[in-house]
Amino acid sequence: MAVNTEKESKSNREVVLGFLEEAESWQLLSNQFPSKVGGRPAWLSQVDLPALSELQCERCELPTVFLLQVYAPITEYDRCFHRTLFVFCCKTPACYTRNDNKCFKVFRCQLPRKNDFYPFDPPPDEKPELLVNDHQVLSSGLKLCRLCGCLGQKACSRCHSVTYCCKEHQTIDWKHRHKKECSNEASQSSEELSSFLFPEWELVTDPEELPAKDEELDEANSLDQESMACLNNGLEDSELESMALHETQDSKVFQKFKKRIANEPQQVLRYCKGGSPLWVSAEHVPCEEDVPECPCGAKRLFEFQIMPQLLTHLKVDRTDASIDWGTLAIYTCADSCDQATKYSAEFIWKQDFSGDQAV
């Protein structure tokens, strides 16, 4: 999936929907520039990977795990000829407190067409005769964690043939398979995905198509983010009136959400760079000042959102607690500033369902 990010007026911006499909493993490698969910990340730049400290959950301080990546080049800028956004999340359900984003990480990486890692021309559509396996060692020579696919600097002290990002991931992999294969190099295979990771899928896209009457209603009923975020301001004279208005407003927002996704209920992602998210609630909607500027000084704009439907494909349900969200809105640098080969941190906003809402 490659998302077209050409500039359009805000009112005419097309929404592109993301869906999951099965794919062959070679189609999800870095040199195919994939959009994907689960498994290990298919790193774009082969150097300057995020450090362990950048990937740690801000609640439990354990490393976050790869959730998905979206290949979204910006053709008007040569520096963004290749451009991918990476999202990571914590696997500890207790870290998912209401409307809190501390257990998520987002990174942007981009490269010009002429770069040190990929051919100038696009890759072929058929399976190459020689596969480049980048699951354990990148083309740059950087070693990856055998479990999660992030930067791995710690080698197994017995066999020295596999590396890990941290002791916790080494312990998980030891119990899962490495205990049986340590010092037996012939039996070691980094192709197998650990059950610790999310199931792997390809993300494919289609433009959102709405009936004409729905497009008109969407424009007429769209809620300004500032007014939603400041819903109760000025209503202090009557707490009951404020509560009643809030419940009515929240119901409207949720009904709008359900109606909008009804045509394509399997969508797991909505992409609309510079547009507005489809909120699930009138609660916890960001004002402009809630979204921090990029370190370069440019504003961050909404780019895409992750839908709650994705949770059903991640196999995260538990009886006691589970990973959960209403929607995750990703905001990125409006200028997609040049960071050379680095992975630049971007911003994510987590909104949960309110009350007894359910999709």
Image (tube, rainbow, N blue to C red):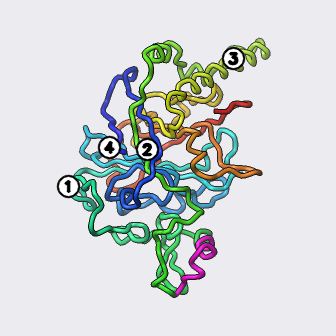
Residue 181 vs residue 173, the one in the foreground = 181
Say what amino acid the circle numbered 3 marks.
Answer: Thr
In this rendering, position of residue 131 left or right of residue 351: left
Q: Which residues are magenta?
A: 171-183
Tag 1 residue: 120
Earlier residue among tags 2 and 1:
1
The prevailing secondary structure element of the residues shown in magenta is helix
Residues at discs 4 and 3 in contact (Cβ within 8 Å): no
Residue 120 vs residue 268, the one in the foreground = 268
Q: Quadrant of the C terminus?
A: top right
**Vertical side of 325 occupied by 280: above or below:** above
Q: Quadrant of the N terminus?
A: top left
Is residue 86 in sight in this rendering?
Answer: no
Mark 3 element type: helix
The residue positioned 28% from the left and 69% from the top of the image is 130
Residues at discs 1 and 4 in contact (Cβ within 8 Å): no
Q: How many angstroms separate mark 2 from mark 3 (CA)? A: 39 Å
Tag 3 residue: 248
How busy is the neighbourhood of tag 1: few (under 14 within 10 Å), some, or many (20 plus)? few
Say what amino acid the circle numbered 2 marks.
Answer: Pro
Asked whether 164 falls inside the magenta stretch, the response is: no
Earlier residue among tags 4 and 3:
4
Asked whether 178 falls inside the magenta stretch, the response is: yes
